[in-house]
Amino acid sequence: MKHLSEYRDGEKSLKLAAEISRIATRPWAIMEVCGGQTHSIIRNGIDQILPEQIEMIHGPGCPVCVTPISVIDKALEIAARPEVIFCSFGDMLRVPGTGSDLFRVKGGGGDVRIVYSPLDAVKLARANPGSEVVFLAIGFETTAPANAMAVKIAKDQSIKNFSVLVSHVLVPPAIEAIMNSANNRVQAFLAAGHVCSVMGFHQYPAIASKYGVPIVVTGFEPLDLLDGIRRTVLQLESGKAYVENAFPRVVSEAGNEVAQETIAEVFEITDRAWRGIGVIPESGWKLRPEYADFDAELKFNVPQVAQEHVTICRAGEVLRGAIKPHQCEAFGKQCTPRNPLGATMVSSEGACAAYYNYGRFVKP
Amino acid sequence: MTKLDPIEIQSPQCPVPLRDYPEVILAHGGGGKLSSELIEHVFAPAFANEHVTLLSDSTPLNLPNQQIAVSTDSFVVQPLFFPGGSIGELAVNGTVNDLAMSGSRPLFLTAGFIIEEGLQMEQLLRIANDMGRAAKTAGVSIIAGDTKVVERGCGDGCYINTSGIGVLLPERAIAIDQARPGDVVIVSGTVGDHGVAVMSVREGLEFETQIQSDCAPLTALVQAMLDAVPNIHAMRDPTRGGVAMSLNEIADASGCGIELDDESIPVRGPVRAACEFLGLDPLLVANEGKLIAIVASSDADRLLAAMKAHPLGRDAAIIGRVIEDKNRLVVARTPVGTKRIVSVPIGEQLPRIC
């Protein structure tokens, strides 16, 4: 708790903001990659104390938001089966698939349960040998170690009624995809601190030099974020582009090697579709063939049915940083947290939900 | 039609005739002999009071000749027992507090039980005894009741509905539409304790915490508050939806805005920590023994002192003020001096993924 109050100090935050204001001589567009950072920036009003030249572009780092609709539809199909206990992290339950969501499947009689850890789903499988327990394994590099461990434990203990529906995504390929996109405006990145705590940041120097883009590993509290922004602005102003670690109390360059080993044992790199963005090559993880018995897609043989919905929702552009949430015509009108059209309005880490909940809709 | 002699039941010991039934069976709700035994040996001793007559169809009451207030609420909490309380205590305190918030003194409760076949008799005894004890603490009598038993799989062990009758305290009509710009917002203690305590023992979410539910009857605190400041403008117990929900209801009903100071809202360390890792906002987490009072600024210090002098108001704090705002928004001032909107939760608070 000490860390929380320490890194939320209002006075120090204002001082850092003033320093950024002093060093910024030109407009700069900086993307915070992670949805947790977006949430914190909006909740704490960090963007309001930054000088006008600094524009924060909200990145695609919300795992709930980028999970493709086809995966949600598969989840809905599996969860509705009578023999299945379907387990998920809480905020996936309200994400709309084609015409339904997990909450409605639950209401219709499906056994859908919120768990906090995939290991709890393994426990459920052990306790319910007559049921098929399926865990919706989504997320970035942060959730992968626990998901990998759950599958490994199930295999080691021969728990045959456990499987995972995998839609894991990776940060570095997403950063490259953004830099490669035709209308990219991003000039620097705040890399996601929690992802780096697992993976380290040895993948980033190559990206920083290839694209000439500063990358600063950044935490989530107001002082962390402001320090990360300060460092990117210093680099931008001096024409440099390298990798810095502004979150050393959590992140080391090598990351958590034990976690990485577990991930590598269970998962392998694959192309992955991102909701609102499209397929990014080598941007995800899938189960290795040795773990095929635990692959829910194979076990339940769900047909590929869904088509990406064409709606007025512009979540894709929000996720790419092309528009701000309130610039979408549906924002706050047809689309609210109560009736979300896109996943970015559902998850607490989605940029649209952050804007809506913390009041950006009253801004002109 | 005889008056009941109170029988001391020491939970979890089972009285003689029920010992043959370690679990509730369908026949306990069938209206026959087993139903009578359940009432006689579980509910009647636990709820014993001078108003109740055994197995009568209704209970005649003598009410003071003044306005009465009525409230009803159903309780479906899972699990039935949680750190610091149980569904039984919740069922009494929930309805008692709803009555207290309108400025009335709760007198009588009714209790309806829907029990799932297979509920441990020992658990039912504990629930009944918890209700009896809570009623005694709150100064109310449970004067009528009903029991139904549903088939296994058709309920979560036990659901309880309680309805309550109270008398409005003289000249007291505290409504939630009476907040006025300039008024001060006071909360009676730390927020989020109940919600976090229940979540800590929910399947799939278990985590270790010493947090106990704050489940308590607020009648005595309200009385002490009204003694100190008769003219409290609005009161609300922030249960489901938390402080955020209650304040938004008050702002909406009163046609004003409310501005909070983020840093002045009392939250226990472990509750803050649990909310951090679950991704929840303490302002949206349920409480069961807290109230929010809106009062003229000239009365605020006197009211705060009276609250702090009561055990249930020890941690009371001024957390904000009512302001003019035609948009009726509740906003919080962040530590960096910016403002964020405190919106109402959509449904249940969902733990975040990472």
Image (tube, rainbow, N blue to C red):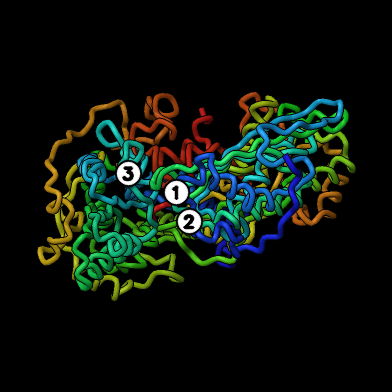
Examine the rendered structure and indicate whether residue A125 appears above or below residue A27: below
Q: What's the chain of the residue with tag 3?
A: A
Q: Which mark is residue B23?
A: 2
Residue contact at pointers 2 and 1, CB within 8 angstroms = yes
**Residue at mark 2 shares a chain with residue at mark 3:** no
Q: Residue A225: x, y in percent?
A: 47, 56
Q: Residue A126: x, y in percent?
A: 28, 64
Q: What's the chain of the residue with tag 1?
A: B
Q: What's the chain of the residue with tag 2?
A: B
Q: Is residue B295 left or right of residue B112?
A: right
Q: Is residue A16 visible?
A: no
Residue at image location 37% in from the left, 49% down from the top: A31
- The quarter of the picture where residue A119 lies is bottom left
Examine the rendered structure and indicate whether residue B228 appears above or below residue A215: above
**Image quadrant containing the N terminus of chain B:** top right
Check disc 3 and give the amino acid type. Cys
Residue at image location 46% in from the left, 62% down from the top: B206
Query: Mark 1: few, some, or many residues within 10 Å (few <14, many ≥20)?
Result: many
The residue identified by callout 1 is: B117
| Residue nearest the viewer, comparing B73 with A122 | B73
